[in-house]
Structure formats: C-alpha cells, structure tokens
Amino acid sequence: IAGITQAPTSQILAAGRRMTLRCTQDMRHNAMYWYRQDLGLGLRLIHYSNTAGTTGKGEVPDGYSVSRANTDDFPLTLASAVPSQTSVYFCASSDSPGTSGGPDTQYFGPGTRLTVL
Amino acid sequence: GQNIDQPTEMTATEGAIVQINCTYQTSGFNGLFWYQQHAGEAPTFLSYNVLDGLEEKGRFSSFLSRSKGYSYLLLKELQMKDSASYLCAVLDSNYQLIWGAGTKLIIKP
C-alpha cells in the first residue's frame, strides 16, 4: 500500500536519551518534512528535505537533526531529549515543491507520539 | 511575522451547513490548503486554492480572496463523521507551508 510509514507509533523516553524517529515513503516523492504538533498550536516545521542529499532547517530545528541518504527515508534524531520535546511528530512528503505547477500537496504519515520524562 | 488565524472551535448540527474562516498574513503566497484531521490521526488533504474564487468538491467547498488574505471552507449536509479539526495552511514564498492552529468542529445530532 503506497504511503508513508512512521515508527515507533509511540514512545516514552527518559530525558537525556537519544532517540531516532523513522519515516519511510514509497511514493517516490522528492520532498520530505518533519513537523511537531502541540495542543493549541499549528503544525510547526522542524526540518525538511527538498531532494535526497539535501536538508534544511524549519521553524523549530533546535535539538533535532535529520539526514536524507536516499529518496525513501528521512529519519529524525533527538540527540539528548528534553521534556519540551514531548509532542506528536508527523512526517510528510510531497512531489516537488515549487516546480510542478500543481498544488504540491503534502501527504502525512500516521505520527509518533513522544513523551519525554 | 507570518500569521494564520482561524476560530478555535465551532459547533454545528447534523444536516446543516457550516463555514470555517481563515485569514492569513504571510511572506508571499503560493496557494492555500485545507486539511481535515480526526482526533489521534494524521491530517488529510481536502482542498487547494491558488486563484480567487470557489472550488467545489462534493459536500466541501473552499473559497479564496487573495486581496483580503481570506479563505473559508464550507461544509454542507453535515454528517457526524465530519467531526474533526480543520487546518488552514498557506504556502509561502519559500514554498513552505505555514499552518493555522486548526478549528475543532463539533457536530451535534
């Protein structure tokens, strides 16, 4: 089934631990994104990648890192988790931002619910 | 700064019509999206507007006025399954989506 998968579904993590959230898409989309969603706030972009081998910082990148070794995978790493990183994390992908002439719709994975204690 | 405003919560009756408004101030504009998000689930795409006017798709319609920085999502013949949050997002000059906080729509029988 085409789409985006994320792992784990949920995780409870001790502060100071390292954690990698996984994201894989099989739609051959060029662009991928990581968002966090907190109550009362809109989705906030953490990092993005417009194509394999490139990444960029979003609105709230501090404390997070990403890599894009290939088209399909876009892992998000928390080097040393803090309680303020408790959130729901969504990975998304889109075809080619700004180039297709079309709507460049973003498609979302099911999310990872992360709690940092 | 960039800002997207939409009501926090709205209530409507099954079978009725509801309009969810969104106003925006962004650096550049390359289109406006509406997404639906059921509790505990991922956002799913509903509609896209880049030109002024109304886009109709079944029970859902979306309107855009670029000069006013304004959009609305119109839901007709409301069903209980339409209970969800509705997210407005604008694609800015860097082709990044700027998101509103979402409008929680409660449908009552």
Image: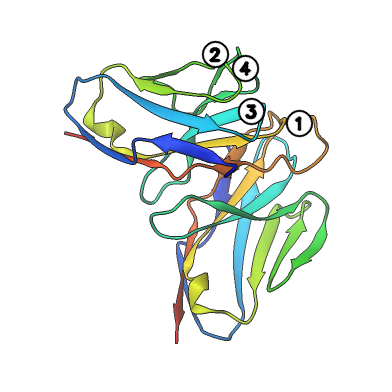
| Spatial CA span between label 1 and label 2 | 22 Å
- Looking at the image, is A62 positioned above or below residue B33? above
Q: Secondary structure at mark 4?
A: loop
| Spatial CA span between label 1 and label 3 | 11 Å
Front of the two marks 4 and 1: 4
Name the mark on residue A31. Answer: 3
Quadrant assignment for the N terminus of chain B: top right
Q: Residue at x 43, y 36 (%)?
A: A6
Reading the image, the residue beneath label 1 is A98
| Spatial CA span between label 4 and label 1 | 16 Å
| Spatial CA span between label 4 and label 3 | 8 Å
Left or right: A32 in relation to A111: right
Please say if the residues under marks 4 and 2 sit with CB atoms less than 8 Å apart.
Answer: yes
Number of labels in the image equals 4
Q: Amino acid at mark 1?
A: Gly
Find residue B10 and report its horizontal and vertical position in percent. Answer: 48, 71
User: Which sits in the foreground, A58 or A99?
Assistant: A99
Q: Residue at x 57, y 53 (%)?
A: B44
Q: Amino acid at mark 3?
A: Ala
Find residue B52 and report its horizontal and vertical position in percent. Answer: 82, 56
Name the mark on residue A52. Answer: 4
Quadrant assignment for the C terminus of chain B: bottom left
Front of the two marks 3 and 2: 2
Task: Looking at the image, tell me whether mark 4 or mark 2 is earlier in sequence order.
Answer: 4
Task: Looking at the image, tell me whether mark 1 or mark 2 is earlier in sequence order.
Answer: 2
Chain identifier of the residue bearing label 3 in the image: A
